[in-house]
Amino acid sequence: MLSIIFALLVNVASAETIVLNQMNDDSIPDGFEVTVTTDSNLNTMHVEVTSCPSDWTVQGIDTVYYNLGRDSYAVTHVDGNPISSLSSTWAQSSSTNNVAGFGIFLSGSVKNTAPTQSQLTSFTFKLSDMEGTIPVNYEGHKVAVHMRLLDGSDVVVEDDSTWITDDSTGIIPEFPSIALPIAAILGLMFILQSRRRKED
């Protein structure tokens, strides 16, 4: 019984959803949102544009920075395809500069395509390894992505771009991370109570 409870506790922090809605460019309207969902059991990170203001179009995401060590968490697959087999790959990169004022991130992936080429607005990275959840950097952020945008409200459609990151309230715990600790505590209480009854 104790081994089962321990296994539950180990898997508590296996998944999280991080909402990115803080932008570095004041000229871009509010309403953009990117959702990053991680699963350390599967070593995956799913990135998806989940909200976009009217009159704007997200062409795609071409850079993803995350606060995981570069050597330990290299991207090996994108949407199930090995990096080596893709014509336009995501190159591993380390961030040594303050990314758009959001702080330094330990690692990231940059798409090797020209800015004018079509990018994806939803994709899944497979990492070489991932233990637990993504830690915050010294500015309190876990992930930052660079989006390429089209502003259709002008007479002439203009290209634009922005960096977007999470804030301290944008981290949504997965249901297991709430339910499993409670179940583990209740299980421990039940075991201790059963032992006391046997001793009496």
Image (cartoon, grey):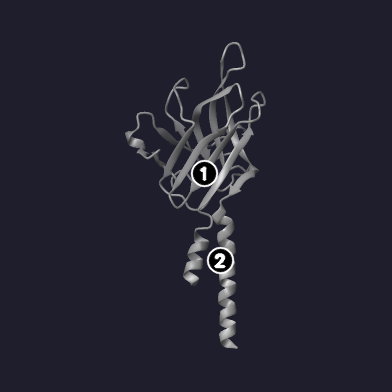
First in residue order: circle 2 vs circle 1: 1
Q: Secondary structure at mark 2?
A: helix
Question: Which dot marks residue 94?
Answer: none
Q: Secondary structure at mark 1?
A: strand
Question: Which residue is disc 2 drawn over?
Answer: 184
- The residue at the point 54 percent across, 48 percent down is 16
Residue 98 in view in this figure: no
Which residue reaches farthest bottom? 200
Q: Nearer the viewer, residue 192 or 77?
A: 192
Q: Is residue 73 above or below residue 57?
A: below
Residue type at mark 2 is Ala
Which percent across, then down, holds residue 143?
55, 40
Q: Is residue 137 above or below residue 3?
A: above
Question: Which residue is disc 1 drawn over?
Answer: 37
In the picture provided, is 170 more to the left or to the right than 85?
right
Q: Residues within 10 Å of mark 2 (few under 14, many from 20)?
A: some
- The residue at the point 66 percent across, 29 percent down is 30
Q: Which image quadrant for residue 152?
A: top right
Which percent across, then down, holds residue 85?
32, 34
Residue type at mark 1 is Thr
